[in-house]
Image (spheres, rainbow, N blue to C red):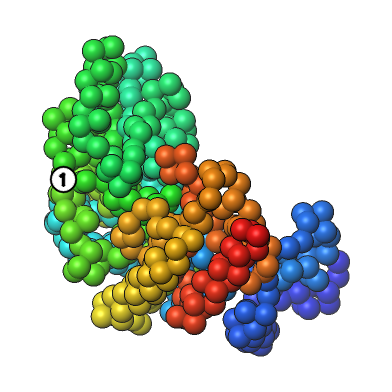
Amino acid sequence: MGSASRKTFLPLDPMTFSNESKAVIDFISDYYENLEKYPVQCTVEPDILEDVNNCIIPGLTHWQSPNFFAYFHANASTAGFLGEMLCSGFNVVGFNWISSPAATELESIVLDWMGKMLKLPSSFLFSGTGGGVLHGSTCEAVVCVMAAARDKALKELGGWENITKLVVYASDQTHFTFQKAAKLVGIPPSNSRLIETSFSTGFSLSPENLRFVIEDDIKSGLVPLFLCATIGTTPSGAVDPIAELGKVAMEFKLWLHIDAAYAGSGCICPELRHYLDGVELANSISMNPHKWFLTNMDCCCLWIKEPKLLVDSLSTDPEILRNNASKSKAVVDYKDWQIALSRRFRALKLWVVIRRHGLANLMYHIRSDIAMAKRFEALVGEDERFEIVVARKFALVCFRLKPKVEAEDLNCKLVEAINSSGRAFVSHAVLSGIYVIRCAIGTTLTQQHHVDTLWKLIQDKAQSSLM
């Protein structure tokens, strides 16, 4: 092409950037304003999505809808959005300290801020003897710490030929991320133990049952490696007993990781902090601010007591990246704390959220969602047709429509009726063979009247189901 054509190609022209960014912000603002007009769950068939420009909105499931009660929410906020804009605007690739020192330093500071809000021991903080890193998801975090645990164990055992002896442990309520991570780091599927839970323990992992399984594996010549405990499981919001499990882990020299992806945010509230009691016995812990901390996707905090183990497992030292700062060992090169080389400036987003809202407002946000969940739980309890299946701990309510005779598809059909209405979106779980409906409250725009409207919708659809 000629020079005249090249002059008209300005992919980052300041004037165009300003005008078009404002237009996008106006579009997003209008989207939020009109969000309740759209069916919460996408109602189109996959093959209809031919014209992207015309079909994006009809093809979305609206995760920011105030009537979204499925899975676990993906919080958004103005502060999170502004932080994401800044992240995209700077577009730095902070793989090591020298590639963008401020990105690395801010991440270290923000991880310590977040850790202190959770009252984590100093052994997990940069200001103490540990440290933290921001990943995109819990899956990434678990893969990294499991790889560190694997490499440490194989070094002690004498080599990679021993990998088939390594065993990892979790409950049957643990997120399936755990099984994916085990596969990715080379643990044979037959060496993943998902220990059964039940109503008797509130679906938390029993330390006694864990001990029995570990002892049985040792008798078989296997080597216990890794234990994943959860604060707020996906199916029911259950909490594993960290202190008791930590003692078992220490006795058998397992790496203990705490997955607090969902409920970790809630532990900034003093009345919920006790769920983290025993965290000092863990080797690592992760939580997702993008779930319940008003931080737009994606953002996962990982803290680790011995960062050197992570670096030893994940580090690379190509000539092109060598520099005096890295050679001094006085700086953090985050490329060695994660799977990928490249990384986004996620710390800026979390920093803006914390600076903009402060601890008091963030606790208010958590408590408001829990208060709405308590009200929904009470409404369910007042209707004799329904029952609460498992006790609520956070803002997740698990309930079901009582069948007159045991009918597996009754609540399944109720979920389908609710979701197909387009007026709300809920999801389900199966607990000890019982199909339950999950109502996860926590979308930023959700208010009490949305919860009340959801309950009225459920009652109406239940009446139709029972007729």
Residue 153 falls in which quadrant of the image? top left
Q: Residue furthest right?
A: 1
Viewer-nearest residue: 102 or 267: 267
All told, the count of numbered labels is 1
Residue 355 in the image: x percent, y percent?
32, 79
Residue 350 falls in which quadrant of the image? bottom left
Viewer-nearest residue: 342 or 212: 212
Bin the neighbour count of mark 1 within 10 Å (Cα to Cα): few under 14, some 14-19, many 20 and up: some
Q: Is residue 147 visible?
A: no
Residue at the location (33% across, 51% down)?
238
Viewer-nearest residue: 321 or 198: 198
Q: Give the quadrant of the N terminus.
A: bottom right
Residue at the location (30% across, 47% down)?
202
Q: Is the residue 1 above or below the residue 355 in the image?
A: above
Residue at the location (62% across, 79% down)?
36
Q: Is residue 175 rendered to the left or right of residue 303?
A: right
Residue at the location (68% across, 63% down)?
420
Q: SS of the residue at dot 1?
A: helix
User: Three-letter amino acid code at disc 1?
Assistant: Ala
Residue 126 in the image: x percent, y percent?
20, 57
Viewer-nearest residue: 131 or 295: 295
Q: Is the residue 153 above or below the residue 24 in the image?
A: above
Residue 58 in the image: x percent, y percent?
74, 69
Q: Is residue 134 rendered to the left or right of residue 55?
A: left
According to the picture, the residue beneath numbered tag 1 turns out to be: 243
Q: Is the residue 375 above or below the residue 321 in the image?
A: below
Q: Is residue 16 visible?
A: yes
Q: Is the residue 75 above or below the residue 127 in the image?
A: below
